[in-house]
Amino acid sequence: MSPALLASPPLPVHVLPARQTVCTPGGCWCALGKRPLLELRLPNAPLPSGWVLLKGRLLRKSGSWAAYLHAELAGPEARPEAGFETTRCTVELSVTRKGTINEAVWLPPGVQRLLLEPMQGAGEFELGSFTLQPVGHLSRVQHMYLRVLDMYTRHPRPRRKRAGLHSRTVVFQLKDAYRIAGQLRTYSPAMSYSRWIKIYDTLSKKDQAAIRRDIRRMRRLPRFKIMLQESAATQDAWRTATRESLVRQLYPNHEFSSPAAPLRGDADTWFVFLPAGAVLAPHALYWLARAIADNRRLRLVYADHDLLDEDGRRFEYVFKPDWSPELLRSTNYIGHAAALRGDLLAGMQAVPTDAAGQPDMHGLLLRAGELVPRYAVGHVHAPLFHVPEAQLQQDWGRTEPAQVAAHLERLGVAATVEPVAHGSRTPRVHCRVRYALPADPPLVSIIVPTKDCLPVLRTCVQSVLEKTSYPRLELCIVDNNSEEPETLHYLEAMAQHPKVRVLRWQEPFNFSAINNDAARQSAGTVLCLLNNDTEVISPDWLDEMLSRLMQPGVGVVGAKLYYTDGRIQHAGDAVGPGGCADHFHSGLEGDAPGYCDRAILAQELSAVTAACLLTWKRIFERLGGFDAVNLPVAFNDVDYCLRVRDLGLQVQWTPYAELFHHESYSRGTDNITPERKAQSMREVEYMRKRWKQVLRHDPFYNPNLNYARPDFTLNIAPMVKKPWL
């Protein structure tokens, strides 16, 4: 058979630093800037052209998960003595969770250099050996079909359909199917927002016709009153853009209303407060109306939005969590992308206003949250509002500390509210709510399981006892069969400390059972579960967490944890992304604001890690503690948080309780035994079965965002049902 149809032997590749990269003496690589590059060289051969298989291993520990291969081509007027003037071809690389690269790539003739961009931003990564293997037609087609068929059989039909992976694509458009299959892999390249809009948020004529048919079928058509809000900075072009977007609405039952008109109406009248310049998508009012018609209990409904650049192009998405009163106290995360029912506004004794006397959106949303239950708030998971970037601080989404303070005063909550600016890291100003502690605060039992590892344990214990400002605590160190003499001597000495108790757990390791037993023996009314590899940073960490736990309706509070190098290790947990649960913002720089500034804002979440978790002892006992039968090692904290939420209680996370978590994020899997792997899989399967519905939609994430990992990149197959389809 012709060699052109088959594969040649793989060629070993040398990896060299090219830009903003350095290899440490231990063999780990560091990316030092925003666009790090590595050069891939063949030591004894020129770079091939045509189809090749690039194989290797790239394990990233922080930063962006997108990776690219750049092929530099010599320009037509390149002069060797002056250096090549090149053009560059770029290919997105699909990388699995384990770091595997096995990609079919087309290299055009004349390639001078191959550059690997392992990530975007500073961070650490490991590299395995790389090879380039020229392949013929049959080998290339076989490789592509194997990946496509694997993804086709692995993913359910609705997800394949949303991603565009149809049977006809597999048969007749193999290259497109291969690209889509790569995007469905765990750590595929992030999709650009412009491409996402083109695929998932562009109305065809067929869509518009279906929407009009659906409107005709609706029995009751909510009436929208659009209140156009202006300021001294409002430009004529902004007014025109907003009015023209109203003219283009597919939904007919709407009208402009005078800013001076009374804010009253019945259950079929809805008010939208729209700053001049904001643009509504053509199907915006229709989708809001359909959500209202489908759930007559709604009294407030909001949508996602995005930003427009100077040329009117949509460029930055803002996909929001579902209703989160605590996040709303930190920032106006909803902006003006909301509609409020007329009788809700009529029920407000006084409508909150801004300095210009216009209704203040942050105040309105806070007031609405006081008057309606959680089930009366709806969220449309679609970017229906488009906002000029220039308006971001002037009119849209402005956070008002005075409105937050007034809101807390109406509720009778003792707290102070401080405006918080974050310098150059984010232009937005947010609020920090400091809840007051009672004059006689409760006793907190801090439970620290341990086995040997004295240096780690000593650091943890000393930081708790010497840095913690909260006075009423007991430190329960739970020894799980320590053997090292120095550890045993240390525990014996610490048992004499007036705030320390040393408990014994002489059974095999079971994290859930250890904490459950210690909780039974604890004296406090509040439990703090703390890993032995943590270290206190902020002295008021416990004051901050406890003051939040003592608010009505709160059952769990989690902390912000950092790796030893200062990068974020934990900023709350997402449930569902990553296959079961995973940390938000892991790997970001310590002071990075994160997506929509959520790494620096107190908020509700579905779960937090038990590396530092505060909860009421009575709730812990009521729920039977951690699940020691099904979850002896992992996910017991996530399971507990979800059970707490099932009681109707909040799980909160605060960025103002800060600790190091000296967990080694570089530890591999070499020391994991087959038995441990099997145990881990059993725990994952239990969680997927027990919390199947929750894992499909974390209310504090967004179905338009990536569910392969909670990195806030776009979902290649958004889990949003369009109501007209």
Image (tube, rainbow, N blue to C red):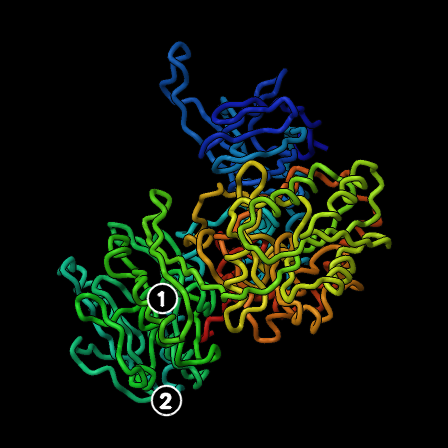
Q: Is residue 54 above or below residue 685?
A: above
Query: Residue at 72% of width from left, 62% of height from top?
Result: 522
Q: Which one is nearer the viewer's eye here, 539 or 636?
A: 539
Q: Is residue 511 left or right of residue 328?
A: right
How many residues crowd mark 1 within 10 Å: few (<14), some (14–19), many (20+)?
many
Q: Nearer the viewer, residue 496 or 62?
A: 496
Identify which amino acid the numbered label 1 is placed on: Leu
501 or 50, which lies in front? 501
Residue at the disc numbered 1: 384
Residue bearing the label numbered 2? 220
Give the percent coordinates (x, y) of residue 399: 32, 61
How far from the left and from the top, in percent, is residue 6?
69, 34
Q: Element at badge 2?
A: loop
Image quarter for residue 484? Answer: top right
Say which residue appears at 56% left-offset and 72% top-offset. 649
Q: Residue at x 63, y 31 (%)?
A: 127
The answer to whether 581 appears left or right of 285 in the picture is right
Of the two numbered discs 2 and 1 on the same chain, state the one appearing first in sequence: 2
Other residues around mark 2 within 10 Å, as few (<14) / some (14–19) / many (≥20): few
Placement of 47 over or under 354, stated as above or below: above
Image position, residue 693 (x, y; %):
63, 70
Q: Is residue 388 visible?
A: yes
Helix, strand or loop for disc 1: strand
Q: Amino acid at mark 2?
A: Arg
- The reply to whether the C-beta atoms of the residues labelled 2 and 1 are less than 8 Å apart is no
Residue 506 in the figure: left or right of residue 354: right
Regarding residue 579, the answer to whether it shows in the image is: no
Q: Quadrant where the N terminus lies?
A: top right
Within the image, what quadrant is residue 4 found in?
top right
